[in-house]
């Protein structure tokens, strides 16, 4: 249990128990709660009770008894838990229990055990266990209590008999003296037992009684001591098995005769085990008599029963008993016993069944029991069966033999030779044996080794057998594993070659190191197996064993340590042993542990191999061992090439110390001989070639040299890379001291055997076959395999490969003074002409390896002098063509991983030569090499996937890599570092950056990670190189100038810092929020390095630990989070640091380049770019005025490609931030964008609205442009071929921008605050936009006005605009009508704003732009209608209108406004009436009809309220001035004139009554005739005038006519009827005026046809209704002509 998370052991709990009273309560509570529903709680409570019981056993036990006593109806599960607690406590502290407490427990347990007559196993067994445990201390008491409940002659309770059995078995020494009492109760009731469970219990009990008797007799001394303290002391004297024979025999008879035949398997098995236990207790004569019947009966059960363990246990007890008292009685039964047991042992035990393994072991005990008395019979039986064809019988038999060898040493002493010969026969046929048999044989052999078998004749063959098994090759292991993987059914008993090899190695090791008697057998026998190649896989173990034996012999000075190799003909000679060990010391599979054993063995064999080298080896070999020991735990630190060099140095020193030419030749011959044996071991052949080359280097025998040089070239398997490399290195070693001889051998190598044709010696013959000169086009590949004597073309080509590579190693190891004089003639003349002819990938690999070696050899450091390798650039270009092929014949898919690595290494080595690479070659190199970033990831990093798509234009076709591409990138880094080292200039650094730029922004994560890691590496390397340069000097002499000798421009610019830092930083910043963690952290580190480089270039002593730089370390850690918001927060802080570090010169370039990051493929990267962009602009935006056009344009161009809304918002924020620093220039740049505005220009304008501090300035600026800029220009319209007005872009853009900004919610407050200004400007713009050729400007202002009204939420104005098609009329010539409605609605909904609007419009009344004057005057004129409550405003409006009458452009609007004065009421209207009347009267007869119409309309309205006295003097004059307008062709004029005439009715009753009365009669006919005018408005005006004027005539008939409904304005008029009625009324009312009426009608005969016809009709009707007198009074001349 735990307390606050800390685990407390039981001792801690119990050592701190509270007082006794509290403990009682705790124990009682725990007991009561022990039956919790949770199993975990039950377990914890039981453990707590147990812990308390350890300290206070009586308390816990008593409390349990009390709880049982108080809770008689306790659940069974609870009872079981408590009984188990009692049992555990009693087992631990039974000796501490008080007697009375123990008695209570006994009573309790007996009651619990027998409470239920039925068997409840868990419950009753728990109680039984308590009794058995107490019986250890109270045996007599427990036995007495049990016997009390075993009534004589009655079958007891099931658990009484089982408890008796367990009790007797556990207390044999104390209870056996009283066992007869028990038997006396048991035996009489055996015949009464019928139930199978009871029979099984009685059988088990009888078996336990018999076992107790046997145990008691075997320990009779201890039993006597125990009996002294027991109640049975008097009965214990002299007890033996015979004492109980007569008691158990009856039970035996019942068991065998009845129960063993039971149908219940459990009874039979329990009975056979009981019989086996009883058999040793029977009297000898009884047992002998029963054996012939009992043994077959038991053996027969093997065929019937499934569970064999009880049978085997019973049989083993019977056999043991028989062997003890009468072994001869078993002899006839042996065949059947052995046959049965052998069959059982030939079955593999089932590991899943515990009983199966136990039965197998019991069966071995049976055989062992038989073998102790009948070894001859047993060995003969087994040897006959080891050759059986069936595998399981053979394996089973060998297993029995192995058991007997280890367990029956004495009985088999005289059978050793027989067993060795039998086993040897099997080892000789090992090729036909399966691995399982070999494993069994190996295990038998180690058993024999421990018991001296192998010292006999045939033992060496068994040792060789083990060594052969230890020499199983890895290829065999892999083949077996592959076969197993393909097998449908797996053999669970199958033995793998690896398992057999491991066991054999262990056997060999154990026999050598732990079995002393094996030393004479193994020494010097093991040396025979050291040199033969077939034992190579076991060489490590052989070396360990030989070294161990030699060490013992040498240390002890044993006489047999020194060996006469001349007499020991079977042993290899010392040079062969040395050659073998030196080769194996470089074998890759040996590694650390194997090499340590080999070194130990060599050291111990030293005195045997050569007397001169012993001391040197004793000094050198321990150093090599120490070198290995230091790397033993981590073999990755062990460089194979370094180790090979150490062994070569050991060989060199050995040759030097030996100082024996003859011995050296023997060593060379031994190496060459072994070389021929390693045909299937290319790794060993590689080592042997190298070591042979070193021997040749030291040799002086020319014939020996020529022979072995030729032999090396002729025996090498040229198509194998390891052999080819080893041979080439060996030839290179030889060239160190024999350069010319080696070059001669390479120039004329041995020709292929079997008549292969050659085109000649030297480069033309040998190399021609490889480079295309031969007709055989087949190319050599790494997978081809041919023998050294093959005549195929591939062998010839392979020879060329070896020769090619050898040239490289010859250059490497040759003396510098000699190689420079031979490089051009003897080497490059052979190689260079063939570079472009190579076709096969293998040939290209070898050539690149050769080029690398040659380039390294030509380096000034290698030559120890300045040297220019003139072939450098050509070789570099050719290597690039190999690894990144281009052109029509290019085959990129043929480029393998090894080719890439070799090519990159070669490029690196070539780039290291002087002088630095030319710029064009440098760029070509970088462009080609970085295409490898498209390689797919290594297979280990995830499932195989197709090659990632390379960035567009890279030209890379990523081939499926055949190795881990990480090696390729390491090689690329090495190349980049070398380029920087040779040219540590900013130009070179930028060139590298440019080559990686496309990969850093790739869609593929692996591309980005690789390129960013490379960039960071390059930056670190650049800093390292620059800082390592001497103070005041260029980083390197060679790098101080470019290839043409001129200084680099980047270096010159570097005096002012890292001039391209902005571009580099812009490439890295988007990667700081890349989805890949490595990319994020590496990018921040790269930014830190860029900034430091800038500082370093300005100040070589710049401190990298400045706080502004070190803070990037914190950013790098924080960016590791996966939470994007946290990443952006980190990047935002980083932008502030960047703002402080980036110089003024680099800031614009950084921002411009950073715009590319807004369109990054990774959405988090685009957002991160926005964060940095905004941070930099916010901090340093004032410095960006010059670069504003580029920045704004770049931001706008980036927006369409931004898919992430967050990024787009950030980009818009950047625009707003720029505007915060340079408001008007940014707005001008946005306005300069093409029309119509794109979505993103619109968003940019709307983004400006979010800046509350500056948005009003933008709005004012736009309004100013709209109001003050020239909006149109006149130019030729290409469609109409005439001049027309076209809108200019700037006002259009400003109009659109204002409308776009009005769409935002942020402008609602501004609209409300500056409503007059905005409305006035927009209305003015309506005028300036109208009348253009394409109507685009009108549509724009219409849209903007809509947005304005929406923003102002001006429902009344919006409603007005929805009527009368007002929106569309804004773009029509009569747009002013819509302006009037807008002004009217505005005056009604925003009456308080009218003065402000007037003030806004007033300057434009006399402005330069005519449309603005018209709109302003239109609005002012309409406002007059709404000034009833504002006399001051009315005065301003009237004055403005009167002052504008002189402007012909706006005179119409001024007249309209003056006419609107009637709306302000009579009082105010009369105040201005004289002036207004004069103004209107002067215009009613204006030559411009619209002006006249407007004047008359105004007068008509004004006459409704003007005082009569003002009009009386001029009324007649006014009538005469109106008269001409009645006949105007213009409908509007006519209508206005009649309306005005009708409005004079108010003056017909005053001082002007008489004069006006006459005027009415004069114009009455005109009104009547025009009631049927062609114009509806004229008709309405005439109807209205009649109704107004007729009352002045005081004629009832006329009044009735004009009051008729048909004269209503909206009603159609039946003109004929009307004319008839009114003519009659006129005649009736004014007959005296008929002549005047008729003459007036005649005046209209020359007018429009409709009026002329009306006149004729009127005259005719009047004529009809006149009397004769009246007709005669008509003047004849006036008679109208016929129509």
Image (cartoon, grey):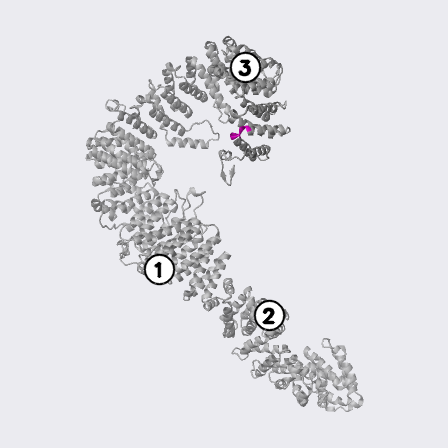
Q: Which residue is more in the foreground, 1450 or 345?
A: 345
Q: Residues within 10 Å of mark 2 (few under 14, many from 20)?
A: some
Relative image position of residue 1434 (x, y in whole percent): 61, 80
Between disc 2 and disc 1, whose residue precedes?
1
Residue 735: x, y in percent?
23, 40
The answer for how far apart the CA atoms under marks 3 and 2 are is: 129 Å
| Vertical comparison of 689 with 1382: above or below | above
**In front here: 1451 or 609?**
609
Upstream in sequence: badge 3 or badge 1: 3
- Asked which quadrant contains residue 656, the reply is top left
Marks 3 & 1, CB-CB < 8 Å contact: no
Give the Cα separation between the discs numbered 2 and 1.
59 Å
Q: Which residue is mark 2?
A: 1368
Which residue is tagged 3?
178
| Residue 1087 sits in quarter | bottom left
Is residue 1423 shown above or below 954? below
In the image, 921 versus 766, the foreground residue is 921
Discs 3/2, front? 3
Q: Tell me which segment is drawn in magenta.
A: 53-58
Residue 887 shows up from this direction? no
Q: Nearer the viewer, residue 638 or 822?
A: 638
Q: Is residue 1052 left or right of residue 18?
A: left
Question: Which element is circle 3 on?
Answer: helix
**In the image, which is nearer the foreground, mark 2 or mark 1?**
1
Tag 2–tag 1 contact (CB < 8 Å):
no
Q: CA distance from mark 3 to mark 1?
A: 110 Å
Residue annotated with mark 1: 1059
Residue 1178, above or below 1470:
above
Image-based side of 46 in relation to 759, left or right:
right
x and y percent of residue 1523 in the render?
Answer: 67, 86
């Amino acid at each position: 249990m735990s307390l606050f998370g800390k685990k407390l052991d039981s001792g801690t709990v119990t050592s701190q128990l509270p007082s006794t009273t509290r403990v009682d309560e705790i124990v009682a509570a725990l007991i009561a709660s022990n039956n919790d529903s949770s199993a975990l709680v039950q377990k914890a409570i039981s453990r707590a009770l147990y812990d308390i019981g350890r300290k206070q056993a009586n308390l816990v036990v008593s409390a349990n008894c009390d709880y049982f006593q108080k809770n008689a109806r306790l659940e069974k599960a609870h009872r079981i838990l408590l009984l188990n607690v009692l049992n555990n406590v009693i087992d631990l502290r039974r000796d501490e229990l008080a007697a009375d407490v123990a008695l209570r427990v006994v009573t309790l347990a007996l009651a619990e055990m027998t409470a239920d007559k039925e068997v409840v196993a868990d419950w009753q067994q728990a109680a039984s266990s308590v009794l058995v445990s107490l019986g250890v201390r109270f045996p007599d008491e427990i036995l007495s209590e049990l016997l009390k409940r075993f009534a004589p002659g009655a079958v007891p309770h099931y658990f009484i008999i089982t408890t008796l059995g367990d009790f007797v078995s556990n207390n044999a020494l104390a209870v056996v003296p009283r066992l007869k009492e028990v038997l006396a109760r048991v035996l009489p009731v055996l015949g009464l037992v019928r139930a199978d469970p009871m029979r099984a219990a009685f059988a088990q009990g009888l078996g336990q009684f018999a076992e107790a008797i046997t145990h008691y007799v075997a320990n009779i001394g201890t039993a006597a001591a125990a009996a002294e303290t027991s109640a049975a002391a008097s009965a214990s004297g002299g007890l033996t098995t015979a004492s109980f024979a007569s008691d158990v025999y009856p039970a035996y008879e019942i068991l065998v005769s009845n129960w063993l035949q039971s149908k219940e398997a459990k009874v039979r098995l329990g009975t056979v085990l009981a019989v086996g236990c009883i058999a040793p207790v029977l009297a000898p004569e009884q047992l002998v008599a029963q054996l012939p019947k009992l043994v077959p009966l038991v053996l027969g059960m093997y065929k019937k029963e499934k569970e064999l363990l009880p049978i085997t246990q019973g049989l083993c007890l019977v056999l043991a008993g028989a062997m003890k008292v009468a072994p001869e009685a078993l002899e006839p039964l042996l065949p059947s016993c052995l046959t049965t047991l052998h069959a059982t042992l030939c079955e593999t035990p089932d590991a899943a069944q515990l009983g199966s393994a136990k039965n197998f072991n019991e069966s071995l005990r049976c055989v062992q029991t038989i073998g102790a008395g009948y070894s001859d019979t047993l060995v003969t039986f087994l040897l006959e069966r080891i050759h059986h064809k069936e595998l399981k019988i053979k394996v089973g038999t060998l297993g029995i033999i192995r058991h007997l060898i280890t367990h029956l040493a004495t009985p088999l002493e005289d059978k050793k030779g027989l067993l060795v010969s039998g086993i040897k026969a099997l080892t000789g046929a090992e090729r036909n044996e399966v691995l399982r048999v070999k494993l069994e044989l190996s295990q038998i052999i180690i058993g024999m080794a421990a018991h001296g078998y192998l010292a006999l004749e045939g033992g060496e063959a068994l040792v060789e057998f083990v060594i052969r098994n230890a020499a199983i090759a890895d290829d065999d292991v892999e083949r077996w594993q592959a076969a197993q993987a393909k097998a449908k059914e797996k053999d669970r008993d199958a033995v793998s070659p690896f398992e057999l090899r491991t066991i054999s190695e262990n056997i060999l090791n154990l026999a050598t190191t732990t079995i002393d008697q094996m030393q004479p057998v193994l020494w010097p026998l093991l040396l025979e197996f050291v040199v033969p190649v077939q034992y190579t896989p076991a060489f490590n173990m052989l070396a360990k064993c030989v070294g161990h034996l030699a060490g013992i012999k040498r240390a002890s000075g044993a006489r047999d340590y020194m060996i006469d190799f001349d007499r020991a003909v079977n042993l290899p000679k010392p040079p062969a042993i040395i050659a073998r060990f030196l080769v194996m010391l470089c074998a890759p599979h040996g590694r650390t542990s194997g090499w340590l054993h080999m070194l130990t063995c060599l050291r111990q064999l030293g005195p045997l191999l050569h007397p001169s080298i012993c001391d040197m080896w004793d000094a050198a070999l321990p150093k090599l061992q120490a070198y290995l020991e230091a790397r033993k735990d981590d073999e990755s630190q062990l460089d194979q090439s370094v180790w090979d060099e150490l062994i070569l140095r050991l060989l060199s020193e050995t040759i030097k110390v030996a100082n024996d030419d003859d011995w050296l030749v023997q060593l060379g011959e031994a190496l060459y001989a072994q070389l021929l044996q390693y045909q299937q071991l290319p790794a060993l052949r590689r080592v042997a070639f190298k070591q042979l080359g070193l021997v040749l280097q030291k040799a002086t025998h020319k014939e020996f040299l020529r022979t072995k040089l030729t032999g090396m070239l002729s025996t090498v398997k040229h198509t194998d890379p390891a052999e080819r490399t080893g041979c080439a290195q060996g030839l290179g070693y030889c060239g160190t001291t024999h350069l010319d001889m080696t070059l001669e051998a390479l120039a004329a190598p041995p020709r292929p055997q079997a008549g292969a044709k050659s085109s000649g010696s030297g480069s033309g013959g040998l190399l021609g076959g490889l480079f295309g000169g031969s007709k055989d086009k087949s190319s050599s590949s790494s997978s081809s395999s041919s023998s050294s004597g093959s005549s195929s073309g591939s062998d010839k080509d392979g020879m060329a490969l070896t020769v090619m590579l050898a040239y490289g190693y010859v250059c490497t190891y040759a003396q510098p003074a000699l190689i420079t004089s031979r490089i051009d003639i003897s080497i490059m003349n052979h190689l260079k002409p063939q570079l472009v002819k190579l076709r096969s990938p293998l040939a290209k690999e070898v050539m690149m390896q050769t080029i690398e070696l040659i380039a390294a050899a030509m380096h000034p450091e290698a030559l120890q002098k300045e040297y220019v390798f003139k072939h450098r650039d050509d070789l570099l270009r050719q290597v690039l063509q190999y690894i990144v092929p281009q052109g029509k014949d290019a085959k990129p898919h043929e480029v393998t991983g090894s080719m890439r690595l070799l090519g990159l290494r070669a490029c690196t080595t070539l780039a290291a030569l002087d002088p630095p690479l030319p710029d064009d070659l440098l760029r070509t190199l970088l462009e080609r090499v970085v295409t490898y970033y498209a390689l797919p990831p290594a297979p280990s990093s995830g499932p195989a996937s197709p090659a990632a798509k390379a960035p567009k234009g890279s030209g890379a076709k990523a081939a499926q890599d055949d190795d881990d591409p990480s090696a390729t990138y390491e090689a690329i880094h090495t190349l980049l570092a070398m380029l920087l080292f040779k040219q540590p200039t900013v130009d070179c650094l930028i060139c590298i950056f440019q080559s990686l730029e496309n990969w850093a922004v790739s869609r593929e994560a692996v591309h980005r990670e690789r390129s960013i890691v490379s960039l960071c590496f390059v930056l670190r390397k650049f800093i390292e190189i620059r800082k390592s340069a001497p103070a005041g000097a260029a980083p390197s002499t060679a790098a101080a100038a470019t290839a043409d000798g001129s200084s680099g421009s980047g270096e010159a610019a570097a005096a002012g810092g890292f001039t391209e830092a902005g571009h580099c930083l812009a490439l890295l910043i988007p990667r700081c929020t890349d989805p890949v963690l490595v990319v994020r952290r590496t990018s921040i580190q790269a930014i830190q390095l860029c900034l430091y480089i800038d500082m370093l270039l300005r100040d070589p002593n710049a401190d990298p630990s400045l706080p502004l730089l070190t803070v990037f370390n914190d950013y790098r850690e924080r960016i590791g989070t996966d939470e994007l918001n946290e990443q952006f927060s980190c990047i935002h802080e980083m932008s502030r640091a960047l703002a402080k570090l980036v110089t003024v010169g680099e800031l614009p370039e950084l921002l411009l380049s950073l715009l590319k990051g807004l369109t990054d493929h990774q959405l988090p990267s685009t957002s991160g770019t926005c964060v940095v962009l905004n941070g930099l602009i916010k901090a340093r935006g004032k410095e960006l005025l010059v670069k504003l056009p580029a920045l704004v344009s770049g931001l706008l161009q980036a927006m369409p490609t931004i898919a992430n809304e967050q990024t787009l918002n950030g980009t818009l924020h950047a625009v707003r931030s720029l505007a915060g620093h340079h408001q008007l220039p940014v707005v001008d740049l946005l306005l300069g964008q093409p029309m119509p505005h794109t979505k993103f220009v619109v968003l940019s304008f709307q983004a400006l609205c979010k800046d509350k501090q500056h948005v009003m300035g933008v709005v004012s600026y736009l309004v100013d442009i709209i109001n003050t800029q020239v909006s149109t220009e006149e130019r030729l319209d290409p469609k109409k071929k005439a001049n027309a007005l076209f809108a200019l872009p700037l006002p259009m853009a400003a109009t659109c921008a204002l409308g776009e900004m009005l769409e935002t919610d942020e402008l609602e407050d501004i609209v409300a605050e500056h409503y007059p200004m905005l409305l006035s400007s927009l209305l003015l713009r309506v005028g300036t936009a109208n009348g253009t050729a394409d109507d685009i400007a009108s549509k724009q202002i219409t849209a903007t006005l809509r947005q304005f009204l929406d923003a102002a939420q001006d429902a009344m104005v919006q409603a007005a605009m929805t009527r009368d098609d007002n929106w569309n009329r804004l773009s029509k010539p009569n747009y002013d009508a819509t302006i009037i409605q807008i002004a009217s609605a505005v005056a009604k909904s925003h009456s308080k704003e009218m003065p402000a609007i007037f003030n806004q419009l007033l300057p434009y009344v006399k402005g330069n732009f005519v449309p603005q004057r018209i709109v302003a005057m239109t609005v002012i004129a309409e406002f007059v209608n709404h000034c009833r409550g504002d006399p001051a405003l009315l005065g301003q409006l009237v004055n403005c209108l009167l002052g504008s009458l002189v402007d012909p452009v706006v005179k119409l609007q001024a007249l309209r406004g003056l006419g609107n004065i009637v709306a302000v009421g009579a009082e105010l209207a009369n105040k201005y009436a004289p002036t207004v009347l004069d103004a209107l009267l002067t215009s009613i007869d204006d030559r411009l009809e619209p002006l006249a119409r407007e004047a008359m309309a105004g007068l008509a309205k004004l006459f409704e309220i003007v005082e009569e006295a003002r009009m009386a003097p001029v009324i007649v004059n006014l009538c005469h001035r109106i008269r001409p307008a009645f006949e105007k062709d213009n409908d509007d004029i006519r209508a206005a004139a009649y309306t005005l005439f009708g409005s004079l009715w108010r003056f017909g009753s005053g001082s002007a009554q008489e004069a006006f009365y006459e005027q009415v009669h004069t114009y009455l006919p005109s009104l009547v005739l025009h009631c049927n005018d062609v114009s509806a408005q004229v008709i309405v005006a005439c109807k209205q005038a009649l109704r107004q004027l007729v009352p002045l005539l005081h004629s009832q008939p006329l009044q009735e006519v004009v009051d008729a409904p048909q004269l209503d304005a909206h009603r159609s008029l039946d003109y004929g009827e009307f004319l008839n009625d009114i003519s009659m009324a006129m005649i009736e009312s004014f007959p005296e005026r008929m002549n005047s009426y008729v003459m007036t009608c005649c005046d209209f005969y020359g007018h429009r046809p409709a009026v002329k016809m009306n006149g004729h009709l009127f005259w005719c009707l009047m004529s009809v209704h006149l009397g004769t007198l009246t007709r005669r009074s008509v003047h004849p001349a006036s008679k109208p002509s016929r129509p």
